[in-house]
Image (cartoon, rainbow, N blue to C red):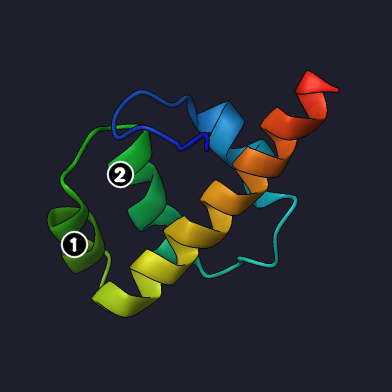
Amino acid sequence: MSKLIQGQESEAKIDLLLSLTRINSVNKIDALKLHLVKGYPAVMAYELCDVKQQNFKSTLDALNRVYTTHEKLNEL
């Protein structure tokens, strides 16, 4: 299973993946970008953006599911 990697993703990639979801909370998006693009630890990212841990985790899981689907499509 493909997963997005902390601090290793481009902002453009995250924006494109987000466009395939219903995630629209600015705080959640900012927390994801801090974690995935800038490399902040998850705890720091969601606390700085005032997002609850469970909400951050479910948002990150949703984005990883979209990414996994994208990767599977690329393999076909």
Q: Is residue 65 left or right of residue 55?
A: right
Residue 4, position as x, y percentages in the image:
44, 36
What kind of residue is marked 1? Answer: Leu
Q: Is residue 15 above or below residue 46?
A: above
Depth check: 40 or 3 in front? 3
Q: Residue at x 29, y 44 (%)?
A: 35
Q: Residue at x 46, y 37 (%)?
A: 3
Question: In this orientation, does residue 51 appear?
Answer: no
Badge 1 marks a residue whose secondary structure is helix
Residue 46, position as x, y percentages in the image:
25, 63
What kind of residue is marked 2? Answer: Leu
Depth check: 27 or 60 in front? 60
Q: Residue at x 23, y 34 (%)?
A: 39
As drawn, the label of residue 73 is none
* Residue holding disc 1: 48
Residue 64, position as x, y percentages in the image:
53, 48
Marks 1 and 2 in Cβ contact (< 8 Å): yes
The crowd level at tag 1 (other Cα within 10 Å; few <14, some 14-19, many 20+) is few
* Residue holding disc 2: 34
Depth check: 70 or 72 in front? 72
Q: Is residue 70 above or below residue 35?
A: above
Looking at the figure, which quarter contains the C terminus?
Answer: top right
Question: In this orientation, does residue 57 appear?
Answer: yes
Q: CA distance from mark 1 to mark 2?
A: 9 Å
